[in-house]
Image (cartoon, rainbow, N blue to C red):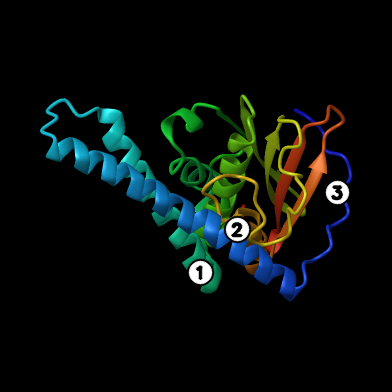
Amino acid sequence: MPTASEPHAPAPQASPLGDTAFLSRALAQGLDTPLAALRASLETLGHELRAGVKDIQPLRIEGVLGEFERLGRNVRELLDYATPPAPRPLPCTVEEILRAACTPLAADQRERVLVACVEPRAELVVDGPLLANALGRLLENALEAGSGEVLLVARREPSGTSFTVVDGAAGGLLADGQTVPFFTNKPNHLGLGLALTRRDVALLGGRLEFLRTPGGETCVRISLDSKETVR
């Protein structure tokens, strides 16, 4: 298993004006772009229906549904960003958290996630869904970065419990602007994933660290203190 190096120095925080500029661009990219694509897809589908085309390509319908899903995901992210949750800690196992983090991923993405955990039945007192959502965002980010496989590691230590996403893609999760809300170079994305993860980890009383292994892999680690865990 790769050993992580020291954490990178945190990137400077964006100014409120910078956040506004990023928000405007992100809204155009995350909402206008999928809306335009959805309109184009529906117009093409409507033209084929009016023309009496009987053999409409399944990919056409899948494309329309995909645009609806992307648009809905971006709206949910905006709502999540605008309304921070109140953590509700309850007993849950490490295995339950790992499974909940992977379940929302697409089937082909789940196949690329390797999970390593020595004590899957160990219990934590934490808001499990909130932690799983944070891990899920890190996994999705790593998978979209182009990694063939992504490693998700859960480890119990005297000081607490850590969850680490190891990404072998070049650049990985340490792209420029990682701490700036609404920064993204991905089509149809709002750039809120890491900002939401950082916020939720702080709400859980944990720490979010960006590290490198000696082999150059990117590691993003969520650490929870022992007071958030139970044996």
| Location of residue 23 by image quarter | bottom right
Q: How far is disc 3 from disc 2 in space, using C-alphas? A: 22 Å
Q: Which is nearer the eye, 37 or 140?
A: 37
For the image, the number of numbered tags is: 3
**Does residue 177 appear left or right of residue 117 in this picture?**
right
Position of residue 183 measured from the top left corner of the image (x, y, whole percent): 67, 56
* Element class at badge 1: loop
Label disc, if present, on residue 135 of the rendered structure: none
Which residue does the numbered mark 1 point to in the structure image?
Answer: 88
Which residue does the numbered mark 2 point to in the structure image?
Answer: 192
Which residue does the numbered mark 3 point to in the structure image?
Answer: 7
Residue 126 visible from this viewpoint? no
Position of residue 173 measured from the top left corner of the image (x, y, whole percent): 71, 43
Residue at 62% x, 46% y is 138
Which comes sooner in the sequence, label 1 or label 2? Answer: 1
In the displayed structure, 89 sits above or below 74; it is below
Please name which of the two marks, 3 or 1, marks the residue nearer to the observer: 3
**Does residue 187 appear left or right of residue 51 in this picture?**
right
Q: Which is nearer the eye, 99 or 8?
A: 8
Residue at 40% x, 54% y is 35
Which comes sooner in the sequence, label 3 or label 2? Answer: 3
Give the amino acid type for the residue marked by disc 1 in the picture.
Answer: Arg
Give the amino acid type for the residue marked by disc 2 in the picture.
Answer: Leu
Residue 29 visible from this viewpoint? yes
* Element class at badge 2: loop
Position of residue 77 measured from the top left corner of the image (x, y, whole percent): 50, 60
